[in-house]
Amino acid sequence: MTALDAAPVPLRRTRPAPPVRHVHVGLGNFFRAHQAWYTHRAPDAAQWGIAAFTGRSPHLADALHEQDGLFTLDTRGADGDHLEVITSVAATHPARDHAAWLRYLADPQVVLVTLTVTEAGYSRGPDGGLAGTDQVAADLVALLADPSALVSTVPFRLVAGLAARRAAGAGPLTVVPCDNLPDNGAATARVVREAARLVDPALADWIDDNVSYVTTMVDRITPEPTADDVASVAALTGVSDSSPVVTEPFSEWVLSGTFSAGRPRWEAAGATFTDDVRPFEARKLGLLNGAHSLLAYGGLLRGHTTVADAIGDPGCLAWVEQWWDEASTHLTLPADDIVAYRTALLARFGNPTMRHRLDQIAADGSQKLPVRILPTIRAERAAGRLPQGGSRVLAAWIAHLRAGTSVTDVQAPELVGLAAGSLDEAVPRLLNELDPRLAQDGGLVAAVRREAGQLDGT
Ligand SMILES: NC(=O)c1ccc[n+]([C@@H]2O[C@H](COP(=O)([O-])OP(=O)(O)OC[C@H]3O[C@@H](n4cnc5c(N)ncnc54)[C@H](O)[C@@H]3O)[C@@H](O)[C@H]2O)c1
Ligand SMILES: O=P(O)(O)OC[C@@H](O)[C@@H](O)[C@H](O)[C@H](O)CO
């Protein structure tokens, strides 16, 4: 008898969940394939339950609540599927369950907060400080009126939780951002500090004294699961799981900083602790995420749907290799490490069992290109070179915005407006949005204009 012949078994706990000592914001696919998986594998997992909150929509919190926080992780490699039920998520909550959020943060047993809220979720303005958005302003007004008011932005959710912690005398805590942002610990500290100071300068001082921020590089390609993935996991396991996650065998987590009140033994599960994350971060953001953005915009233009489709196109592959040559020049890890990483990336991108959609990666280019592409372009220009590969990534993004129909970005209406009209005008306008200094660099503007013309045939 195969698993398919039997009635599906519901996914429920048979043993108590581990006690909650860690809270996560951004319950989604990546957190479940990465941080929840590392904790599940840690030798002290029985002491480190996670309460996970969604960033916005309640859907996944509700679905996992029905399964006691359990879900199946389907790791798809060349040798087939490896299936395991991850047990580290002890409780799930929608973002609107703010009372639960405040309760956890006020609990001295809870000493860790991790985040996967996308690059845009940090509410950072162009200089990295707290953005002046309507949501930020609304959260400030709400918190000044009532410290327990529901707030929606990540900086103010943290500030509200930390205010509750201070009031309860619950002691120190560590925040561990796990999004693809360079120096994400310092980036998070800055927006939280600025938000706290607006609410109560004494609270900001307490946070400075009691909250540590760890900087991380995170890596594991985890696409949004499809209905076919849900069906295939059910067929393979015979268990009815509404919300499995599909991921790749490769995983990396590099962390740097002080955990003021303890953490799971993630190093025993494969995480690396180091004094300096930056060389790993630069390698990953430039080579993996930079090539992802190139494949997203360039691949969509060439009619592809997934990363595996696009990397199988010799034209896209040549673009990626050229971009990698430029980016690699400025990486500080040993050359053989970079060569090995590039070789491994080609296999990871080409993994035919992963349907990593290019339109998912294309979202929020205005937030992603500055960290994935611009550092290499600036370094190339400082070295007196005009990087064709980097110019092509910017040109492909511009062509994507000009196509206009499927642009998902926190600044979408503004960007689509700036992309309209002649390329001669649109290119400097859009470069100016990314960084005004780029728009003043005549050589670079001309190179991006040339590449954009090649892409759309003008
Ligand atoms: N998926 C991957 O391969 C991968 C790998 C490395 C890092 N990451 C990081 O993790 C992030 C999430 O990826 P995912 O695959 O889990 O996505 P997902 O869509 O499955 O989950 C995203 C989570 O972030 C929340 N969120 C989105 N925008 C937000 C905002 N503006 N404010 C607050 N919360 C917000 C959502 O509500 C959801 O809980 C990525 O943006 C990236 O920074 C992802
Ligand atoms: O998750 P995003 O939207 O920040 O970026 C899309 C991909 O580039 C990214 O998710 C990679 O798959 C990931 O960073 C691999 O570790």
Image (cartoon, grey):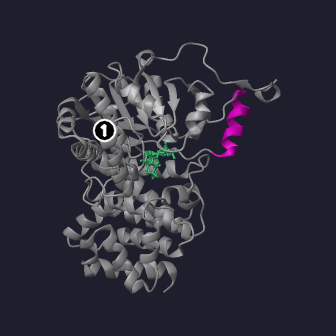
Of residues 115 and 277, the one nearer the viewer is 115
Point 30% across, 51% down: residue? 282
Of residues 155 and 422, the one nearer the viewer is 155
Point 55% across, 35% down: residue? 61
**For the image shown, how many numbered marks are present on the structure?**
1
Q: Is residue 341 left or right of residue 361?
A: left
User: Residue type at mark 1?
Assistant: Val
**In the rendered image of this protein, does residue 46 appear above or below residue 53?**
above
Magenta stretch prevailing secondary structure:
helix
Tell me which segment is drawn in magenta.
226-239
Residue 20 visible from this viewpoint: yes
Q: Is residue 265 left or right of residue 304?
A: left
Of residues 415 and 329, the one nearer the viewer is 415
Is residue 237 part of the magenta span, yes or no? Answer: yes
Of residues 284 and 263, the one nearer the viewer is 263
Residue that numbered label 1 is attached to: 159
Point 32% across, 79% down: residue? 445
Residue 14 position, x and y percent, is 61, 14
**In the rendered image of this protein, does residue 368 appear above or below residue 188?**
below
Residue 175 position, x and y percent, is 31, 34
Q: Residues within 10 Å of mark 1 (few under 14, many from 20)?
A: many
Outermost residue to the front: 145
**In the rendered image of this protein, does residue 149 appear above or below residue 400?**
above
Q: Is residue 197 left or right of residue 137?
A: left
Quadrant of the drawing holding the N terminus: top right
Point 70% across, 38% down: residue? 232
Could you say whether the residue bearing mark 1 is in a helix, strand or loop? helix
Outermost residue to the top: 15
Residue 338 visible from this viewpoint: no
Residue 132 position, x and y percent, is 31, 58
Q: Is residue 24 left or right of residue 237?
A: left
